Amino acid sequence: MSLSKIKNIPYGKNIIELKNISLSFGGVKALTEVSFEVKRGEVFAIIGPNGAGKSSMLNVINGFYKPTSGKINFAGQERLQMEPEFAAKSGIARTFQNIALFKGMSTLDNLMTGRLLKQKQNLFMQALYFGPAEKEETFHREKVERVIDFLDLQSIRRTPVGSLPYGLQKRVELGRALAMEPEILLLDEPMAGMNVEEKQDMSRFVLTANHELKTTIVLIEHDMSVVMDISDRIVVLDYGKKIGSGKPEEIRSNKAVIDAYLGVSND
Amino acid sequence: MSVELLNFIETVLNGLMSGIMYSLVALGFVLIFKASGVFNFAQGVFALFAALTLVGFQTGQVPFSHLINELFGTKLHHWYPEIHSFLAIIFTIITMIVLAWIIERLVLKHLVNQEPIILFMATIGLAFVLEGIGDLMWGSDVKVLDVGIPSGGSEWLENATIGLAAEGSEYYGMYIDVLNVWATVIAVILVTALALFSQYTKTGRALRAVADDHQAALSVGISLRTIWVFVWAMSGFIAMVAGIMWGTESGVQFSLSLIALKALPVLILGGFTSIPGAIIGGLLIGVGEKLAEIYIGGLFDIGAIENWFAYFMALVFLLFRPQGLFGEKIIERV
Amino acid sequence: MIYKETGQYNSNYRSDHAIFPLMQDKIAFSLLMLVAFLFVPFVVDSYWEKAILVPFLIYSMAAIGLNILTGYCGQVSLGTGGFMAVGAFSTYKLMTTYPDLNIMIIVIISGFISALVGILFGLPSLRIKGFYLAVATLASQFFLVWLFNKVPWFYNYSDTGQITVSERTMFGVPVTGAAAPPYATYLFCLVLVVVFGFAAKNMIRSKIGRSWMAIRDMDIAAEIIGVPPLKTKLTAFAISSFYIGISGSLYFAVYLGALEVTESFDIMAISFPVLFMIIIGGLGSMLGSFLGAAFIVLLPIVLKNFMVDLVGLSAVTAKHFEITIWGLLMVVFLIVEPHGLARLWSIAKEKLRRWPFPY
Amino acid sequence: SADLKFPMLVYRTGAYAPNGIPNADGFVDYYRMINARDGGIGGEKIVFPECETGYKTQVGVECYEKHKEGAMVFQPMSTGITYQLIPKATADGVTIYSTGYGRTSAKNGKVFKWIFNAPATYWDGASIAIRHILKQNLGNIKNKKIALVYHNSAYGKEPIRTLETLAKKHGYKLMLLPVDHPGQEQKATWLKIRKSRPNYILMWGWGVMNSVAVKSAASIKFPMENFIGIWWSGSENDVLPAGQGAHGYKALTFNAPGTDYQVHKDIKKYVHDKGNASGDGSHFGTVLYNRGLFQAMVQVEAARVAQKMHGTSKITAAMYRDGMENVNLDAARMEQLGFKNFSPPFKNTCENHGGSGLAAVQQWDAKAKKWNMITEYMYGDSDVVDKLIAEDSAKYAKEQKIALRCN
Amino acid sequence: MDDISIKNNKKHSKNKKNTDLLIVNNIEVVYNHVILVLKGVSLNVRKGGITTLLGGNGAGKTTTLKSISNLLASERGEVTKGSISFENIDVHALDPSQLVKLGVIQVMEGRHCFEHLTVEENLLTGAYTRKNNKEVKYDLERVYNYFPRLKDRRTSQAGYTSGGEQQMVAIGRALMANPRMILLDEPSMGLAPQLVKQIFEIVSQINKQEGVTILLAEQNTNMALQYAEYAYILENGRVVMEGSAKSMRDNEDVKEFYLGISGKGRQSYRDFKQYRRRKRWL
Ligand SMILES: Nc1ncnc2c1ncn2[C@@H]1O[C@H](COP(=O)(O)OP(=O)(O)OP(=O)(O)O)[C@@H](O)[C@H]1O
Ligand SMILES: Nc1ncnc2c1ncn2[C@@H]1O[C@H](COP(=O)(O)OP(=O)(O)OP(=O)(O)O)[C@@H](O)[C@H]1O
Ligand SMILES: [Mg+2]
Ligand SMILES: [Mg+2]
C-alpha cells in the first residue's frame, strides 16, 4: 500500500478499524473480541490495568503479533493481520514499553535509522559514498537534525544510547519514531519513569507532532492526568476485553472503568 | 536375520555409543551455559588438562619438570612411583576445584554482566592458558592413561550375535567397544543426577537465574562467586570423566582438546540449556553421522563426511527448532 | 589539553559526517598513508614482508570482513576459514583456467564468488541466532574444506590436493610466485586493503551500515522500523564473504604461494584467530579490525623473539609460554576493556582531551 | 659468519608434538655430539636454532624467513611446510631436505634443484609395502582387498596414485579410507573395515591417528601382521597405547631402532653423560629419535662433502647444495660415521635427489616392547614410480616454467 | 522553610549518627574511567524511615542506589571518592550478595526479571539467602496476596508477562528476601494507578509493621512525598536540596517543577507551550 492512500483519508475519518480482535498465547488470552477504531489526526489512548492487553494491541496493529481471529481494516483495506515491514512502509511508527533502542549506536545514528526506508541509494553508491550517496545522507541528516532540535537532544547526539538515563532513552525512541515522519505513531507508555516536568515536555512533543505534523497518535499511558488531558478519545481494556470507550470525560465517569482501573479518585 | 540388517544394527549401536562419548563433552558445556550463560570453549582443554593431571598424579610426574630442568639444570622426573588410580582421581578432582576457584577469581569475577561473546572469547583465552600451562606442567608427549576401565571389542556380544545371521552367510558377530558401554553407564548416571539437581533444587534455580541476568542475580543475593566456582568445578569433574574416556581410547595428548569440536553439533542439536538434550543430541548425532559415513559415504565413495555431516544434521534440526531440540525457547518480545 | 578539538567547528553536515572530522586525525592518517606508500616499500625486506606486513594486511582484510558480519551485523561466524578457502580456490582455478587474466581482476572475482557462497550459507541466519548460529556456521567451515579436499577438480587433479600459485605480474613486476619482490606483494595488498577499507567505512556510515547495526542491536525493533531482516543479513553475509574471499585469495596467491586446504584453512588456523582479531580489536570498529590484526600477527612473533632471542629459553618452552601468555593477554584485555583496543584508544584520546584534568 | 647454520623447524607443541619431540631430540643430540666430539664440521661449529612451528604452515613461513639468512639447509618436518617452501627456497637458493616426506616428485633433481628427499619417497614406500605383501602371497595378490587408511591431507594422499597404478598392475582391489585431522574418532572407518574385511591395511597416518588406528585394529581383531604403516606410522607412540593388542603390527622403516650403534655410544659419552641431552633424554633410541639422528647425519655429511668439493670449510648455501647433491653414504662411510647397518646405503646424484629408495619392514613385539626388523631393505617398484615421478615433475616444471638441469 | 537547606559544596555534618542506618558520604562515581556522574553526594537514611531520592532523568538516582548495593562494578562504574557505610560497615568491602545477607536489597530499575524462570521461580529466587522454608512459603503467599495478578500467572515464564506484571515480580522478589532495608528504584514505573497506590501502601506497611528501612528513588514526586519522611533532590549528580517531606511539599520550586502545581493549581498537560530550562539550581 502506498502512503498516498493513507494521505487521502480525510482527517477525522477512520484510519484503522479493529474488528473483534482476539489473541491468545497457549492458554493465556491476551485479547478477546476487541473492536475499536482510530480516526485520522486524533490522539487516541488505550488504558487499562497491568496485563490487560494494551501492549499486545499495539503489537497487533503493527504486525508483530498475529491475531488469532478478527480483522484489521487499515486505510480502507481489510486484512487478517499486518506485517511489520508493511506497517513500517505504510507509515506506522512506534515506541516500546521496554525501550527498544539500538544500544550500540549513538543517538544520531538511532534517529538516522528512522530514515532508512526513505534512503534509496544502492549498495555500490554507498560504498563509493562520494556523490549521490553523500548528498542523500546530508539531506536526511538535515531532517534528523530537525527532530534533534525539536526534542532537545543536541547534547547527546554522539552518546551511545545504551548509557543514557532511562528518561532520555524514551525521548530518543520517540525521536526515532518521529524521524520516520509517520502517519500513525504508536506510543507505549512514553512517559513512564518521568517526573512531572519531563512529562510536560513529552506531552508537548506529542501534541506538537499531532497538531503540526498531523500525525495520528495511539497512546498507552498509566498517568491518568496526562491521558485525560491530551487524548481525544480513550478505549479501556481489562483482562483483554474492552470495557469502555469514549471521550475523556465519559471515561472519567464510567463506572466499570472506575472499578477496574481508576480506583476512587485519581488526582 | 540378514547380514545387512545385522550390520545396520551394528552401525546404529556404534553410532549411539560414539554419540555418548560426545555427550560427555557436551554435558560440560551445557552445565556452564545453563548456569552462567557462558559458552565455555575451554571445555575441551579442560578435559585434556584433567586427563594430563590425572596421569601426572598417577605416575608421580613432577609438575613443571621440563621448565625447572631447563632453568636450573636439574634432572627432575618423578617424585614417587605409580599410585592407585582412585587416589589420582581424587587428587585430580581437587585440582579441578582449585582451578575453578582460580578461574572465578581471576577471570569471571571481572566479567560480570558482559556480553556473551566477550565471555565466550575469554574462555578461549582460558583455553590457551590451560593448554600452555598443561604443556609446561606435564610436557607434551603422549601419555598412556589406564584407570582400569576395560576397553576393546566385547567378546560376549560377538559370540552372542554370531549365530543370528542366516545360515551360510559370512558373519563375524557384532562389535561394540566395552569402553563405550562404560561411558554410557556413567553418562546416564551423570545426566540423571544433574537434571534432577538443576530442576528441583534451590541452587539449580539460582543457576538458571544467573544465566538469565547477572545483575539481577546479584541483586537478589545470589553469590555469583559461589555459583561459578561450583559449576566450573562440576564441569571440571565432567571434563575429567570425558578426559578419562577419551584418553583411554587414544592416549592423553593435545588432540584431546579438539574433541570439543565433536561436541558442538551435539550441543546445538540438543539445545545449549538442556542436560537431557546433551544426551539425546549425542545419540542422534552419533547415529546420524555413522550411518551417513558408512552408507552415504560408502555409496558414493566420498569418505570423511561425518565431520560436516554432523553439523549439517544439527543445522537442519535448528531450522525447525532454533533453540535446539530441548533448549529453552528463545524469548522474543518487544 | 593535548588533544584539542575546541576551535574546530563543522559548519555543515557533510564535514561533520566525514571519516575523520578532527584535524589531528586527518593529519595523522595522511602521514600514515604517506609512510605506508612512500617509505615502507623502499625498506621492506622479505622477513618483514612475509612474516609481518603481508599477513597483517591480509588478516586486516579478513577482519574487516568478519567485523562487518559479526561486529556490525551481530551474526557470529566461525566459518571464516571456509570462505577464505573459497577465495583461494577460486583464485587458483581462475589463474589456471585463464592464464592471461590480470591478477587484480582475479582477486576481485574471487571475492564475488565467495560472496555468492556467503549468501548461500547465510540463509539459515534468518531463523538461527546467537551461539546456535555461530556453531552452525561451522557447518560451512567443515563442508567447504571437505569439498576442496575431496573434489579433485578444485585442485586440478594434483596428486595431493596441494595448489601452487604461478607467477603473475602487475605493471611488469611479479606480485605472485616466489620471484615477487617484497615491495610488490606489499603494495599489491596495501592498495586492496586501502581501497576496500574505505569502501567498508563508507558502507558502515551509510544506510546499509545502520541497517546492520540495527539488526545487531535489536532485530525485532529493526524489523518494526522497516529493516528487512533477511535481506540485511544476507547483504552482510555477502559483503563479509567478499572481503574474506579477497583475503583468502591474497593469502594463497601472494602470501603462501602454495597450500593445502585442510591444513591452511583449519578452524584453529583461521576462523578463531580472525574472530580474536575483531574482538581484541573491537567489535564494530574499523580501526579495531586493523589493531586486532596487528596484535594477533605481531604478538606471537614478538613474544617468540623476545623469549628465544633475548631471554634465551628453548623454542619449546618459549612456545608453551607464548601460548600461555597469549591466552592471559586475551583475558586481561577483555577484562580491562571488553570493547577492545579501539575503545582503549578512544578512551586514551578522551583522557588526552581532558588532560590535565582527570574527568 | 663462519658457523654452519642448520635451522630446525620443530614442533614440540600442538597436535603432533608427541612425534615432533623425539625426532627433534635426535637432531639436537647429534649436532651437539658433532660439536663436542669433532669440534663441528671441518672446524666449523654447527648452530641449530630451533623454531617452533606447531606443525602450522604459516608459522613455518615465518620461521623460514627468520632463519634463512646464512642457512645451509632446512628440514621442514611437515609435508605442508615443504610444499610451501619449495618455490621460496628455490628462489632464495637454500637447500630443503625432506627426509622421506614432502613432495615425492622432488626426487627428480632435473626439476627440483634445491630440494632433496632421500633416502626414500612415499611412492617408494607404497610400492615396497605392496612388494612385501606380494612376497607373502607368493607373488599373487589378484583380487585381494587392500585398504589404505590415510590422514586426509596432502601427506596422506601422497601414495594414492601409486597404489592405484599398482592395483592395475597386480589386480588387487584398493579401498580408500580417509581420516580427518586429528584422527581421534575413527569408529566409522573401522566398522567399514570390519565389515568389508580387507586382506591388508596400509596406513599413512600421523600423530594420534596412528595410535587410535592401531588400537581400533586390535579391538576389531584385525590380524595385525596384515596391517602395515608407512615409516611415519611406526613409532613407539603409535603402538604402546594399544598394549598387547598391537603385537605384530608392521611398519616400514629406513632406519633401525635401538641403541646398539656407535653413534649412540658417542652421543651417550659426549652429550648425555655431560648432562646436555635434548629434552629429558627419554626418547634415546626410539624410532623417531633414531630417524632424527639419521636426518642430521645426512645434513652434516652434505656439509663435509661440500667442504671437500670446494676446498673451504666456510661454505655458502650454494656450496652446501652441491654437497648434498654429491652425498655418497655407502656402507663403509656409514660405518665410519658410527651408523653401521643402521640404514641402507644411498647416494644422491644430479638427477636423483631421492636416494636409494630402500626400506625394510619392521614388526612390533608387544611383549618385549621393541621393534624387530623382519625383512631386508627392499627397492620399490621403480617401473611404476619413476614414471609417475617423471609425469608429476614435468607438470610442475611446465607450470613454473623451470628449465631442466643435468643434461 | 527552615527545614530546607539549599546545598552548597560544604560537606554536611549531622549528629544523628546513631539513628542512621545508611550513610553515604560525599561519593563520586565514574563510569568507564571517564564519565563522572556523581559529584559528591551525601545522604543519611534513618533506620526505620522512608527516605526518598528525587530528581529528573539522568540526575543520578539509579547510580546512587547502585553504588550503595555495590552493583556498579558490573556496569564498569566505580566509586572513586567518599564512602558508604551500612550500620558502620563499609559497603565497599562487601559483595552484593553479602549485602543481601545483611538485609539490603535493591529493586532494580527496568524490572530485570529472570526471563526464562517462571513467575513463581522468580519470586523464589528472591528468597535465595533464606533458610527457613516455612517462612518462605508464608511470604510467597503474602506476595500473592499483594499481587493477585501474579498468582494467575505463576507458571508463565517471566519473559512473557506484561511490563506491569514484571514490575510486580521485581518488587515481590525483593519482598521475598525479608530485608531490613530496601532500595527501591522507581517502583511505580509502568504500573496502573491503583497499583501505584497499592505499592506505596505496601511499602509503608512493611515499613511501619516490620520496621524495614526504605530508600526510594521516584519520579512520581507526589506519591513519594506523601509517604516519605525525608527527601533529597538530586540534580546533575549533586544533592541540591534536602529536607523533611512535608517542608518539601510546601516549597514553591518543588511544587512547580516536581509536582506540576503552579500558583493557579494544577495546569493541564495540554497547555504547556513554552520550553523551560531545567537544572535551575546549578
Ligand atoms: N553504564 C553507564 N555508562 C556510562 N554512563 C552511565 C551509565 N549509567 C548511567 N550513566 C550516566 O549517568 C548519569 C546518571 O544516570 P542514572 O541512571 O543514575 O540517572 P537516574 O537519575 O536514575 O535517571 P532516570 O530517572 O532516567 O532513571 C546519566 O547521565 C547517564 O548517562
Ligand atoms: N508473547 C507472549 N506470550 C505469552 N503471553 C503473553 C505474550 N505477550 C503478552 N502476553 C500476556 O498477555 C497479557 C497482556 O499483555 P500486555 O503486555 O499486552 O499487557 P499490558 O496491557 O501492556 O500491560 P502493562 O500495562 O503491564 O504493560 C499479559 O498477561 C501477558 O503476560
Ligand atoms: Mg504494556
Ligand atoms: Mg534511574
Image (cartoon, coloured by chain):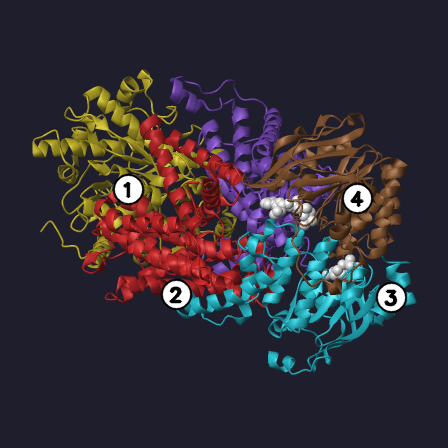
The residue identified by callout 4 is E248
Image quarter where ligand 3 lies: bottom right
The residue identified by callout 2 is A128
Query: Which chain is mark 4 on?
Result: E
Query: Which chain is mark 2 on?
Result: A
Q: Residue at x 35, y 38 (%)?
A: C301
Residue C240 in percent (x, y) is at 44, 59
Structural crowding at the residue carrying mark 3, measured as other residues with C-alpha within 10 Å and reported as few (<14), some (14–19) or many (≥20): some
Q: Is mark 3 within 8 Å of ligand 2?
A: no
The answer to whether dots 4 and 2 both sit on one chain is: no
The amino acid type, in three-letter code, at marker 3 is Arg
Structural crowding at the residue carrying mark 4, measured as other residues with C-alpha within 10 Å and reported as few (<14), some (14–19) or many (≥20): many
The amino acid type, in three-letter code, at marker 4 is Met
Q: Is residue A14 above or below residue C52?
A: below
Q: CA distance from mark 3 to mark 4?
A: 30 Å
The amino acid type, in three-letter code, at marker 2 is Leu
Figure chain in brown: E
The amino acid type, in three-letter code, at marker 1 is Gly
Instruction: Choose the circle earlier in sequence order: 3 or 2.
Output: 2
Classify the position of the N terminus of chain A by image quarter.
bottom right
